[in-house]
Amino acid sequence: VDELKNQGNQAAKAGDFDKAIECYSQAIEMDPNNHILYSNRANIYSQKNEHQKALNDGEKCVQLNPKFGKGYVRKADALKAMNKMEEAMQTLEEGQKNDPNEPLIKSRTDSFMNEFQSNFTTQIFGRSQEELQAKMRNNPKINAMMQADPTLFMRANQARQNPNFMMSMQQDAGLQQLIVELLGLGDKLGAHKEAQGCQNECGDQCCQKTGGPCCKDKKEEPKQEAKQEPKQEAKQEVSEEQKKADELKLQGNELFKQNKFTEALEKYEQAFDTFKSVVYLNNISTTHLKLENYEKALEKATEALEFGRDHQASFQEIAKALAKQGSALHKLQRYEEALEKLRQSLLEFRDKQTLALKQKVEEDFEAFKLKQKFDPELAKNLKDEGAVLIKNGKFLEAVEKYTKALEHLPEQMLTPDAKVLVLQVHNNRSVALFKAGQIHASYEDCEFVLKQEPENIKALLRKAQIERMRKQYYLSVETYAEVMRLDQTNQEGYEGYQKTQQKINEMQSGTLTETEMKEITDIAMADESMQKLAKDPGMAQVLQQIQQNPAAAQQFLADQSVSKKLQRLINAGVIRMGKQ
């Protein structure tokens, strides 16, 4: 399974998604309860735009392990791609509750919120300064507002670029009115205000906003001269140098498509030498990325950004330069810097490819951090230090050592040897917690170990002992019985079984008080499995017959189809065979 998973990971890195899916699918057939395999396959399905399959795998992942945060991210990505943003956000909220330490959940939540904000901003203001300007000029009411308020366009453009533009809007009445007009709500709101206007002496309505005089008191205002529409700017002439540079760029593009990157680079450099433009610098940076000259790609992208800002380039070209910086920094494994550049790029212009790259960088960054954290040798040293602390009676300090050891053994990175080490650390931490009196936390570590190694005698003995301490005698006697099945000579298991069976006998003989019995049965009935058993229709009929005739219990105990269930109810004190 691990070999197939690793093959899938390598295929995914190489961009061979079909091969990756094939490997993960084969691994799932061998280990259908491995939640990480479903998570990995969901990620690849998303990259292939097979979102329903990605959603199915994401749901299966969180079903198998509700504490695995990345599963919620996979599910949310698929839902968002299917335009189910509300469900996607709910999924991330659920993931945050179940795995509050998964950083990818927070980063994805922030990304979704930013995209929602950006989409809303784009709907109102458009994608670029030019688009906003056109929308405002083509609306007669807004055109009049611009002439009355010369800074309106500048403020609107700042709001378009500002992710917190809603805050800006709340403090700017002019901006609020502009948004109303851009959304086409101006006439509706105007009619609503007019309908609510105050009646004056002559029966007409006056303006609530200005508190103006009655129409009978108004003098006829002189008609304003029709305002001339601004003249369209003449189309800028393209110089011969730019024409030649564009021709060189086109030649470079053809070579680029043929994967002749060195030759394409020469054409783009000639284009920039012929006519200085940020477009050609971005092309040069892209080609260096393809040639794996990442430092050079970063240098050229930085040059493109500076040149573009100095020469008032379009937002799209500025965004491209920032995205190229992000790509180069990603390849150089400078993940935090890469993410910052990509965020800046998305603020300039919202591009799907940049969004996808940002998500990829986030995931690679998390994988990188896991790889940096993965240190089995250090984990083993911490485990040994914990063992020394237990011998010296410093149980809580030992727990800290074991917990730190597990931090250096992230689940996604485990080799077969590291998996063995993880079980040893959990087992040892369970001992330390038990000795420190934290039996519930100790029990959780026992269950973790037994899920991987059901026949681990030490974990079974500790589990049975804790169950007896918690007065879950119906569980304890079964766990001790499992120990005896695995090792008939185990003295601790034998003695534990005898002590637990004695307690059950006391329950059935009426030795315990009603208060003690109520406590024991209440503990048992708090267990969901016991509730289901007690409510089982077949068992309800059996219980009814036993209540009418207690001697019938022996008859039912001889029936293998019901004996195990009935014995558990007896061991839990729900059914009493002795004193009634």
Image (cartoon, rainbow, N blue to C red):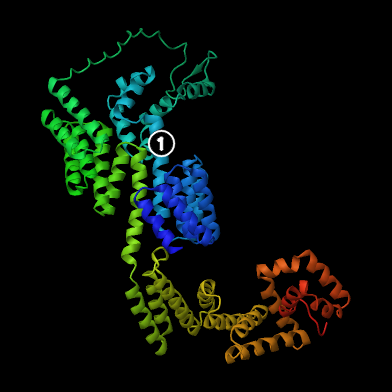
Q: Residue furthest right?
A: 548
Q: Which residue is located at x 32 percent, y 7 percent?
A: 225
Q: For the C terminus, which image quadrant?
A: bottom right
Q: Residue furthest left?
A: 273
Q: Which residue is mark 1?
A: 119
Q: Is residue 268 left or right of residue 232?
A: left
Picture layout, residue 238 above or below residue 352: above
Q: 363 or 91, which lies in front?
A: 363
Percent x, y for residue 445?
50, 75
Percent x, y for residue 370?
35, 62
Q: Which residue is located at x 40 percent, y 8 percent?
A: 220
Percent x, y for residue 244?
15, 24
Q: 261 or 130, which lies in front?
A: 261
Mark 1 neighbour density, 10 Å: few (under 14) some (14–19) many (20 or more)? some
Amino acid type, mark 1 = Asn
Q: Provide the secondary structure element on which disc 1 rests.
A: helix
Q: Which residue is located at x 84 percent, y 78 percent?
A: 555
Picture layout, residue 202 above or below residue 191: above
Instruction: Answer whether residue 38 is visible to the viewer in this image.
Output: no
Q: How many marks?
A: 1
- The quarter of the displayed image where residue 181 is located: top left
Picture layout, residue 240 above or below residue 263: above
Q: Which residue is located at x 71 percent, y 82 percent?
A: 516
Instruction: Answer whether residue 391 is visible to the viewer in this image.
Output: yes
- The quarter of the displayed image where residue 572 is located: bottom right
Percent x, y for residue 484?
62, 85
